[in-house]
Image (spheres, grey):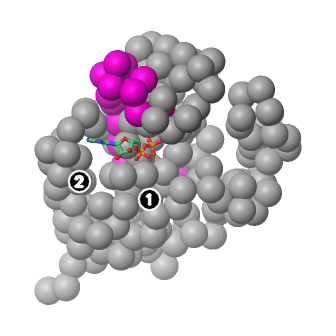
Amino acid sequence: MSKQAPVIVITGTPGTGKTTHAQLLVEESPVPLKHINVGDLVKEKELYEAYDEDWQSYTVDEDKLLDELEPTASEGGIVLDWHTSDIFPERWVDLVVVLRCDHTRLWERLEKRGYPLKKIQENNEAEIMEVVLDEARSSYASEIVVELKSESTEDLESNVARIVQWIETWRKDHGTTEQ
Ligand code: ADP
């Protein structure tokens, strides 16, 4: 059966606003979407190989993670919220949104989150070097990768409105709108 709703990846350096965007998108989407916070899923289902105390992060077991997500991804109707995107197979994904944020603002957001200094520095540098954007661009067709600024509430609202528009077009193209 063909998908009734798309698979949308929302990616970006930690703190750029992925979860905030995903939550608002689920509320405003014209088709039912389920928000999957991949980091939380990894913890809940223990889809990791190890925990690195120093970096306070998990080394993900990618095979286990993909097996866990495969059935839902094939059905469609999900928003995958994660700071990396290249692990998801191209055939799953309809749209990749890469959120960007000014690095000083990002620093403040990560400080508020209580991240250790070296984790703040690492993420800050990654944002400046466009690591997540490069990764998305080298993993997916350029037509499906969209870079969006996430610095203010206005940005958040207009980004979500844009994605909702995109979903409307996706539905028409896939013949899933009611006549
Ligand atoms: P991520 O999921 O990418 O780690 P979050 O969605 O948790 O990021 O957002 C991190 C913090 O930044 C939160 O406090 C959130 O309210 C704030 N934030 C995110 N995006 C925006 C935005 N566009 N405008 C204002 N604040 C934002």
Element at label 2? helix
| Residue with the most extreme right position | 49
Measured from the top left, where is residue 110 in percent x and y? 47, 31
Which numbered tag is attached to residue 160? 2
Relative to 64, say whether 177 is above or below.
below
Mark 2 crowd level (few <14, some 14–19, many ≥20, 10 Å Cα): many
Residue found 77% across the figure and 38% down from its top:
59
Point out the image quarter for the C terminus: bottom left
Relative to 106, say whether 4 is above or below.
below
Q: Which of marks 2 and 1 is nearer the N terminus?
A: 1
Residue found 19% across the figure and 45% down from its top:
153
Q: What stretch of residues is rendered in magenta?
A: 90-110
Mark 1 crowd level (few <14, some 14–19, many ≥20, 10 Å Cα): many
Split into quadrants, the picture shows ligand 1 in the one at top left
The reply to whether discs 2 and 1 touch (Cβ–Cβ < 8 Å) is: no
Measured from the top left, where is residue 126 in percent x and y? 50, 19
Asked if the magenta segment contains residue 92, the reply would be yes
Please give left or right for residue 63 compared with residue 94 in the image: right
Q: Mark 1 points at which residue?
A: 79
Measured from the top left, where is residue 96 in percent x and y? 39, 44
